[in-house]
Image: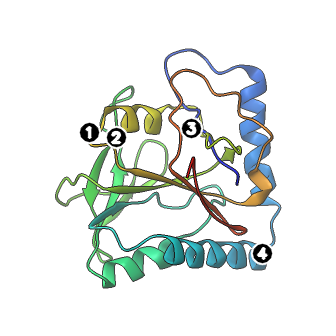
Amino acid sequence: MNLMKQDDQDNTPPSPDRRQLRRDMVARRTALTPASHAAHSAAIVAHLQAALPPPRCVAFCWPIKHEPDVRAVITAWRAAGSRIALPVVVAEAAPLAFREWAEDGELLPDRYGIPTPVSGNWLSPELILLPLNGFDAAGYRLGYGGGFFDRTLAALHPRPLAVGVGFECNRLASIAPEAHDQRLDWLVSEAGAWRIGG
């Protein structure tokens, strides 16, 4: 079993080593061929469907920087009755909000260039699919340095199920988690799906 870490947070500037590690993680994914990326993404989708029933409401992140593309599971869960949401940055140091997204709904890039719904109801997801920039076997995730998901998971009550999705090329020995880092509940890669601590 291997897990991930959510290292994104507070106002402390990231260390040069952590910044470089984030760049290295993106470079590893970028080096995947299109065929490998598509095959790994499809395997992750299959593992998600095998491990988790369709949730009432699920939030996912539009894939950027060669992250796994799990939109196929979103389509399947929507067909099974799930409501779908995408995260919205509402303020620089605040938790994310989640806006309902329809497949024909308009998306515009936010301040970070991430496609974001411009309209829709605000929802409270019971499951969040989190992209893994890097991850470790303890269930911690390395993000991009903004701390958004750590703050969000810490603030939401009840806390949604946090399911990390990532490629094995981004697995690390340890993220060296800090006090603010939120542990995942599940880790899913092309190699399988693991319940953290379970």
The residue that disc 2 covers is 96
| Rendered position, 5 above or below 56 | above
Do residues under tags 2 and 1 come within 8 Å of each other at their CB atoms? no
Rate crowding at label 1 as few (under 14), some (14 to 19) or many (20 or more) other CA atoms within 10 Å.
few
The residue that disc 1 covers is 157
The residue that disc 3 covers is 6
Counting residues from the N terminus, which is met first, the one under dot 4 or under dot 3? 3
Type of the residue with mark 2: Leu
In front: label 1 or label 4: 1
| Rendered position, 147 above or below 88 | above
Counting residues from the N terminus, which is met first, the one under dot 3 or under dot 2? 3
Q: CA distance from mark 1 to mark 4?
A: 38 Å
Rate crowding at label 4 as few (under 14), some (14 to 19) or many (20 or more) other CA atoms within 10 Å.
few
Type of the residue with mark 4: Ser
In front: label 3 or label 2: 3
Q: CA distance from mark 2 to mark 4?
A: 31 Å
Residue 29 position in % (x across, y down): 75, 58
